[in-house]
Image (tube, rainbow, N blue to C red):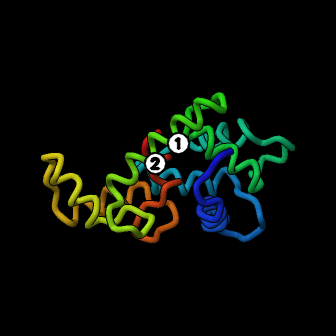
Amino acid sequence: MVVSKSGDLTALFLSLDRDADGLISAAELLGCMRATLGEDVPAEEAEELVASVDADGDGLLSESEFLELAQQAAWGGDAGEEDDEHRIRALREAFGMYEMEGQGCITPASLRRMLGRLGAERGSGECRAMICRFDLDGDGVLSFDEFKIMMS
């Protein structure tokens, strides 16, 4: 898997691991999905996601299994290495347009500025809400990894 900052996904994994056992249960994943999608997700869907990458069959996601799931979410399944490189380049270009502040993340202010340039004026509160929907680690901004998930 190619990630811009492996630390971003590791931090996300740790934030989802509510009981700090080094594994993410379907229930912990379900909580994340509900917070991210802003709607109730059937427990069966979370269990299916866990099962889809649960290599050891224990019903829990290790960090490596979680990274595999994140890759599938970002790219819609397995993709060739050349396709991955092309997609990452395109996503980095798009991310750079929104990022604009040299901070390596999309802030509500940078999102608002870019949307304004595109003719889609939004208020600060709306931009914060847009970011909050995909801000998986709760830091108030979108990292590149969160942006990839949002764009999938």
- Height in image: 104 above or below 64? below
Question: Which residue lies under the disc numbered 2?
Answer: 92
- Of residues 91 and 68, the one drawn nearer to the viewer in this rendering: 91
Q: Would residue 13 be found to the left or right of residue 107 on screen?
A: right
- The residue shown at (43%, 55%) is 134
- Three-letter amino acid code at disc 2? Arg
- The residue shown at (41%, 46%) is 93
* Crowding at mark 2 (Cα within 10 Å: few <14, some 14-19, many 20+): some
- Of residues 43 and 124, the one drawn nearer to the viewer in this rendering: 124
Mark 2 residue element: helix
- Three-letter amino acid code at disc 1? Ile
Question: Which residue lies under the disc numbered 1?
Answer: 88
- Height in image: 105 above or below 25? below
- Identify the image quadrant of residue 90: top left
Rounded to the nearest whole Å, what is the CA distance between mark 1 and mark 2?
A: 6 Å
- Of residues 80 and 108, the one drawn nearer to the viewer in this rendering: 80
Name the spot of residue 9 as percent of width and height, x first. 62, 59
- Identify the image quadrant of residue 28: bottom right
Name the spot of residue 8 as percent of width and height, x first. 59, 63
Picture quarter with the N terminus: top right
Name the spot of residue 118 as percent of width and height, x first. 18, 46
- Height in image: 28 above or below 86? below
Mark 1 residue element: helix
| Label total for image | 2
